[in-house]
Amino acid sequence: MTLTDQLAADLITAMKAKDAATMSALRMVKSAIANAEIDARGSGKTFDDAAVLAVVKSYAKKLTEAIEEYRKGGRADLADATSAELKIIERYLPAALPED
């Protein structure tokens, strides 16, 4: 099963469970993937599972940066909400190597 298929299946599961946070996070990722796919088509590049993973990594990085900015700005509520969204997205990323 490709990463795109996994995202779609998990979105359907979240919709059935009425899990608003997961639905929102997965819809945002699917939207970012769709935009990247359109850009790739326009430039003649192929869009495979590695490209999907790159989009998911990029989206996770944006969320991490947003959390830092919210914390700097004293918006703990937004930082917590974005952090919850990041945890959902991190399920689709490969496990990071330890710093050791």
Image (spheres, helix red, strand yellow):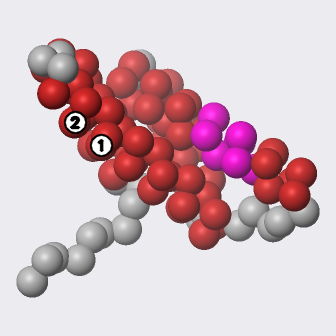
Say whether residue 94 is left or right of residue 1: left
Spot the residue most to the front: 72
Depth check, front residue: 45 or 9: 45
Spot the residue most to the left: 100
Residue 41 picture location, percent across and down: 87, 54
Three-letter residue code for mark 2? Glu
- Dominant SS in magenta: helix
Question: Image quadrant of residue 79?
Answer: top left
The residue indicated by pointer 2 is: 68
Regarding residue 14, the answer to whether it shows in the image is no
| Helix, strand or loop at mark 2 | helix
- Residue drawn at (54%, 61%) of the image: 54
Say whether residue 5 is left or right of residue 18: right
For residue 49: magenta? Answer: no
| Helix, strand or loop at mark 1 | helix
Tell me which segment is drawn in magenta. Answer: 31-37
The image's mark for residue 84 is none
Regarding residue 76, the answer to whether it shows in the image is yes
Depth check, front residue: 74 or 85: 74
The residue indicated by pointer 1 is: 64
| Disc number lying in front (1 or 2) | 2
- Residue drawn at (53%, 40%) of the image: 29
Question: Image quadrant of residue 35?
Answer: top right
Q: Residues within 10 Å of mark 1 (few under 14, many from 20)?
A: some
Label 1 with label 2: CB-CB less than 8 Å: yes
Residue 59 picture location, percent across and down: 47, 45
